[in-house]
Amino acid sequence: MPEANTFKRIIHFNTGRLYQSYGQVVFVGVLADGTIIFDDRSRGVSGQLTKIIDEGVTDATLQRLVMREYDHSDWRDPRYEHADYKHLDELRGLTNETLKEYLEKA
């Protein structure tokens, strides 16, 4: 795992869509520059949104933004934006314990 957390904010939510027995769990990390990286652990899809957010955006608004952009395919593969999956790997490392909690409840 990387030495320092480069995310200024991390949220997670379950959309309730039944891609897995526990639903669809999505993790979202916001970098210091407002770049948004998401990781849909239920479907194995991850991406970087093309939009940047400001600090004052609520978690609920961030969730709606991510799902709208995700559902409309308005995102890029983060492997091409950040070398060696650096930010995606970090997001996964920071959220593995939370994912285990979802799996244990299923």
Image (cartoon, rainbow, N blue to C red):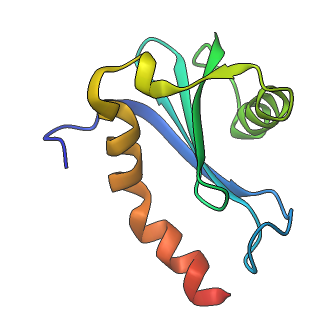
Q: Which residue is drawn at 68% across and 87% down?
A: 106
Q: Residue furthest left?
A: 3
Asked if one can make out residue 13 in the rendered structure from this viewpoint, the answer is yes
Q: Position of residue 9 (x, y in %)?
A: 48, 35
Up-down relation of residue 28 to residue 20 (above or below)? above
Up-down relation of residue 58 to residue 94 (above or below)? above
Q: Which quarter of the picture shows residue 28?
A: top right
Up-down relation of residue 2 to residue 83 (above or below)? below
Q: Residue at x 58, y 46 (%)?
A: 11
Q: Position of residue 3 (x, y in %)?
A: 13, 41
Residue 71 appears left or right of 92 = right
Q: Position of residue 30 (x, y in %)?
A: 50, 28
* Residue nearest the viewer, comparing 32 with 20: 20
Q: Residue at x 43, y 18 (%)?
A: 80
Up-down relation of residue 19 to residue 84 (above or below)? below
Asked if one can make out residue 52 in the rendered structure from this viewpoint, the answer is no
Residue 84 appears left or right of 94 = left
* Residue nearest the viewer, comparing 80 with 17: 80
**Number of disc labels:** 0
Q: Position of residue 34 (x, y in %)?
A: 52, 15
Q: Which residue is drawn at 19% across and 50% down?
A: 1
Q: Which quarter of the picture shows residue 57?
A: top right
